[in-house]
Image (tube, rainbow, N blue to C red):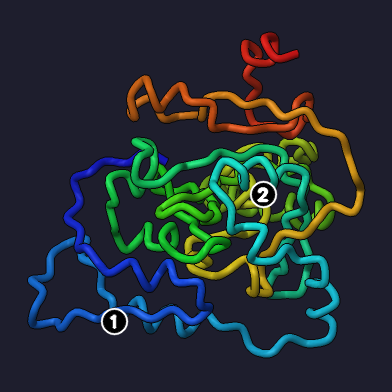
Amino acid sequence: MKEGNNKSTQKLNLKSLLSPQKKITYKLIAESDVKKSKGIVDLKLIKADLQQLKDPPITPWERKICANRLPFSFYNVPCTILAKNILGKILVRKLDNGIILKGKIVETESYLGIADKASHTYQGKVTPRNIPMYMLPGTIYVYITYGMYHCFNISSQEKGSAVLIRSLEPLEGIAQMRENRNDKVHSKSPKKLLKELKIHDLCNGPSKMCISMQIEKKHSKYSMCDWNGLWIEDNVIQEEMKIVECPRIGIKSAGDEWAHKPLRYYVYGHKCVSKRDKIIEAALF
């Protein structure tokens, strides 16, 4: 989640973003009082965007499929606790065409906010992109990395913190997931043949998972607690899991201290994990 610090940013009043009330309000800054530059947060646009994120009244069918949705209290915990508690839970995506996709979460990373050098909110940085990390626990934060890959995160209790969902075990809608992955391949390389992707290769990484589940940047700022397009539900099948705690992936530029902190978590021995840490596994088990 590491990024450069070369963007100009505008500070905003975060008190309202962290309010326990569901309704979110912003202290607006008059346009005449702000000298606009690249990267400035336009609070009027943000307020308008959030007003449009409210779902219409749900149908009985939608109410039924959302019955096992995890509540706000599940997300309103410290980031490291959420990152571990979320393992084994079921991520559910309802597409616009009504198709339901499900996968069991098997790998996560925690980003601890303003103190974490690998976090987008390090030192309290605020940009138009990272605002969901300051919003209520359970808020969706999707960003693009390397100019093309989506990464899906969920905000937690601490200021500016979030959990990155790295990998899933596909459970339902597998044919649609394969179609989504192949559509992405064909959009970039039309000559490539359709692949019969193995189940464990569909969601074993942040960007693969987002492609398979059709999770995109436009879904940022929605709440996992009440949006009907994406939520997490409890796993009715009780499973014993051994959890591996190891360093996160791809954050060497954050420095040795943060690059080596054990803030990645995955289910030991699971085939859908993106990358095993065999050294840590040998020491633990």
Q: Residue furthest right?
A: 237
Q: Is residue 96 rendered to the left or right of residue 12? A: right
Secondary element at image label 2: helix
Q: Which residue is mark 1?
A: 44
What x and y, as percent, mark residue 137?
54, 61
What x and y, as percent, mark residue 94?
72, 68
Q: Nearer the viewer, residue 138 or 275?
A: 138
What x and y, as percent, mark residue 173?
81, 57
Q: Does residue 49 lie above or below 116 as drawn? A: below
Mark 2, other Cα within 10 Å: few <14 / some 14–19 / many ≥20: some
Q: Residue furthest bottom?
A: 57
Q: Residue at x 90, y 54 (%)?
A: 236
Residue 245 lies in what quarter of the image? top right
Residue 49 lies in what quarter of the image? bottom left
Q: Residue at x 57, y 62 (%)?
A: 138
> Three-letter amino acid code at disc 2?
Asn
Residue 182 badge = 2
Q: Check whether the beta carbons of the residues at disc 2 and disc 1 lie within 8 A of each other.
A: no
Q: Does residue 242 lie above or below 123 as drawn? A: above
Mark 1, other Cα within 10 Å: few <14 / some 14–19 / many ≥20: some
Quarter occupied by the N terminus: top left
Q: Nearer the viewer, residue 167 or 30?
A: 30
> Three-letter amino acid code at disc 1?
Lys
